[in-house]
Structures are given as structure tokens and as C-alpha cells.
Image: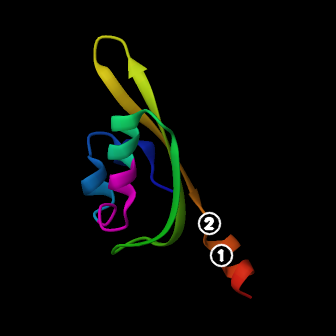
Amino acid sequence: GVDTDAAIGHTMQQMYPGYKEAGFFDVYCRVLATGKPERKENYYEDNELQGWFEVSAVRQTSPGTGYGIVLTFANTTEVRRTQQA
């Protein structure tokens, strides 16, 4: 839900200040260290965003720059609400 132009030039910490506390940062670190893809679903809340989110992280080799990660996010809040109903 974030406009691409608004995201360019900002860090994850700036865009999503609660991502470390939600446990997503630990996933990123493990994926970079081990090379094993991971998926995590957790509740996330900050001043502008709240709900259940699933993140998938995959390590990617970048020639000349080492490793990076590719992240995919899915808002699973509605699925959670349906499951709890």
C-alpha cells in the first residue's frame, strides 16, 4: 500500500518502525546468514499500519556486491479474521 515514489530513498526502519519488534528483522538476518528461505507471519502495528502480515525472504546473490534479500509481503489480516470467526 506504499507508493513507490514515497518508498524510494527510505530505509525499512523509516518506513516500518516496528519491524524489528515484530520479529521480521531476525528473519532477514537468518536468511542472509544461512541462505535458507524463510516465511513468517506476525502481527504488526505502528502509527499508520496494523494487521497480520506474512513475509517471505529469499537470499539473492548480486554479482560484485555480495548478498541481498528479496522480500515478499502479504496482508493476511482478513484471512485471520475469517479463521477466528
The residue under label 2 is 76
Q: Considering the numbered disc 2 on the image, is that residue within a helix, a strand or a loop?
A: loop
Three-letter code for the amino acid on which mark 2 is drawn: Thr
In front of the other: 8 or 29: 29
Horizontal and vertical percent position of residue 41: 53, 63
Q: CA distance from mark 1 to mark 2?
A: 6 Å
Residue 20's tag is none
Residue at far top of view: 64
Horizontal and vertical percent position of residue 28: 37, 46
Residue at x 67% of width, y 80% of height: 81
Residue at x 45% of width, y 53% of height: 2
* Residue 18 picture quarter: bottom left
Three-letter code for the amino acid on which mark 1 is drawn: Arg
Say if 61 sits above or below 20 in the image.
Answer: above
Magenta extent:
18-27
Q: Is residue 52 magenta?
A: no
Q: Is residue 24 magenta?
A: yes
Horizontal and vertical percent position of residue 17: 28, 63
Say if 77 sits above or below 55 in the image.
Answer: below
